[in-house]
Image (cartoon, grey):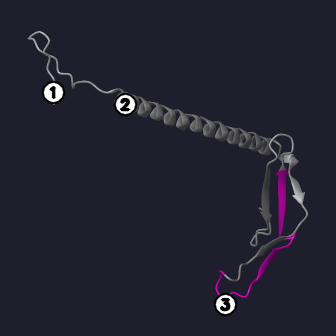
Amino acid sequence: MQKKSAGLKNNVDLTNGSTMIETLVGFLVVVIMILMFSKVVSVSVEMLNATQKVIDRTELFNEKVYLRKNYWKTAGMDIYYTIDTEKTNTKNKAKQIKLQQKDASVNYYFDDEDTNLKMFRFNMKDMINGTTK
């Protein structure tokens, strides 16, 4: 239903425009969208910073590993590989493989100053030439 005012100059349609509720709901929707976008941006920045810290730590460790070649230490241990017999073929009778110190050696590098990371290097004796690789 349209109301029109009397007179030729003041021919105004009073149903045009929006109500106060429509304006508030529209403003609320815009505010919620802005808040959600700002949360996505802040979480992305936090994840980027955490990733950059991991990258910096790893780069520092790798730099130390490859620049300090004489800091590698030999681990005095035998290497055991245990075979999961439930997940392998039933005809497989092996339960464990042992690489003794004469066949293999383990060297490790531990950075206890900055990163607290470890790197292991396995040296195996070549069966053909008898040299360690």
* Residue type of the residue flagged with mark 1: Gln
CB of mark 2 within 8 Å of CB of mark 1?
Answer: no
- In 3D space, how far apart are the residues under numbered discs 2 and 3 (Cα atoms)? 76 Å
Quadrant (top left, top right, bottom left, bottom right) of the N terminus: top left
The span shown in magenta is 87-109
Identify the disc placed on residue 2.
Answer: 1
Identify the disc placed on residue 21.
Answer: 2
Q: Residue at x 14, y 12 (%)?
A: 10
Say which residue label 3 marks.
91
- In 3D space, how far apart are the residues under numbered discs 1 and 3 (Cα atoms)? 90 Å
Residue 81, percent from left and from top: 77, 73
- In the displayed structure, 70 sits above or below 15; it is below
Check disc 2: other Cα within 10 Å, few if <14, some if 14-19, many if 20+.
few
* Image quadrant in which you'd find residue 64: top right
Residue 69, percent from left and from top: 83, 46
Horizontal side, residue 63 vs residue 75: left or right: left
Give whichever of 52, 34 is nearer the camera: 34
- In the displayed structure, 65 sits above or below 15; it is below
Q: State yes or no: residue 101 in magenta.
A: yes
Q: Residue at x 8, y 11 (%)?
A: 8
Q: Residue at x 86, y 45 (%)?
A: 112
Quadrant (top left, top right, bottom left, bottom right) of the C terminus: bottom right
Check disc 1: other Cα within 10 Å, few if <14, some if 14-19, many if 20+.
few
Check disc 3: other Cα within 10 Å, few if <14, some if 14-19, many if 20+.
few
* Residue type of the residue flagged with mark 3: Lys
Seen from this angle, which residue lies furthest right? 76
Horizontal side, residue 18 vs residue 75: left or right: left
